[in-house]
Image (cartoon, rainbow, N blue to C red):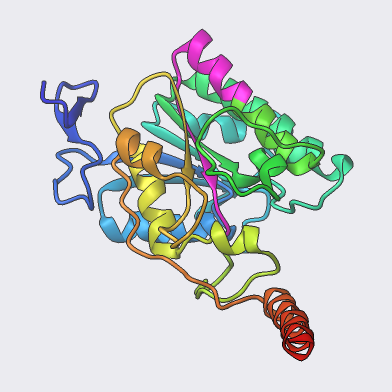
Amino acid sequence: MSPGAIANQTGRKRMICSGRFTDELAVPLTVAITGAAGNIGGKLRSHLRMRGEYVLRLVDIDSRGDPEILCADLATYDERWSALFAGADAVVHLAANPDPTANWDKLLGPNIDAVLNVYLAAARHGAKRVVLASSVWAVASRFDDKEPILAGEPSPGSNAYGTTKLLAERIGKTFAQAHGISTVALRLGHCRSGSNEPSPASSEWLDACWISNADICHGLECAIRADVRGFVVVNLTSANPGSRWSLVEARERLGYKASDGYTPPPRAEAVATTAKRRGVLGRLRGRVGGAG
């Protein structure tokens, strides 16, 4: 079998991730998406449907009136929703509380209990892969330093949301080892709702990890189709100039190629600091000149 294909149960081949997907899929992939009515879930659903190469099974705690989406709380295990994973080629687990400032009482159910239940359902129902939405906040302790951020061990510091993503990654790694469920954990960057046009965010951290709609859908599709085994973790942002986020692992392991990038304008505080320094230097030069 070629390295660019995997076989389904009937022996037919399915092409996997290759650049921007010029290869054709011989057989549709069955993909379950949790959080399908949310920001990223909705974008991925539209992207995959437009591709026409996927059979989608959708679940969310709030279907928002969409009859195609099963309404269910994944923090409570239930065969009604877990049966959606039966024989799935991939489960894309996006459902979570996405608030990086949330307290533990708002995170335990959606960000930890739900992850455990998703993996239990995947193991029981024979899902082949889980694409796990981790987050750049899994390495929140790196917020203020200036060194490159590789896709290594998580280090969320005191950030509760980031800690739930650390735990989610550990759950994924355990199920990959114990049950053979391939897991691709994506440390997702900052993706606004709607058109997600690049604009200055509230911090340099968010500016540096911005990811466009096109890039996040491409990265998720790469994770669905990549020829990898076991547990894999990568960063996923756009190719933002000057960003500390390493995309080498995503490119080498998944074939991810970011098509967008964002260079924010100088931040107001940086401009003010620069002006203040220039003023001080000007006064010092004036004193030196006068002393001469």
What is the quadrant of the N terminus in the image? top left
Horizontal and vertical percent position of residue 7: 20, 24
Instruction: State which quarter of the image contains the C terminus.
Output: bottom right
Does residue 105 appear left or right of residue 6 in this picture?
right
**Most distant residue in the left direction:** 2
Residue 124 visible within the image: no
**Quadrant in the rendering for residue 160:** top right
Is residue 62 at least partly visible in the picture?
yes
Q: Residue 278 at x, y = what percent?
A: 70, 82
Count of numbered circles on the image: 0
Residue at the image position 72 percent from the left and 48 percent from the top: 97
Percent coordinates x, y for residue 281 in the rendering: 72, 80
Going 37% across and 41% down the picture, which residue do you hit? 248
Q: Residue at x 48, y 21 (%)?
A: 125
179 or 167: nearer the eye? 167
Q: What span is colored magenta in the figure?
A: 170-190
Q: Relative to 161, is 169 above or below?
A: above
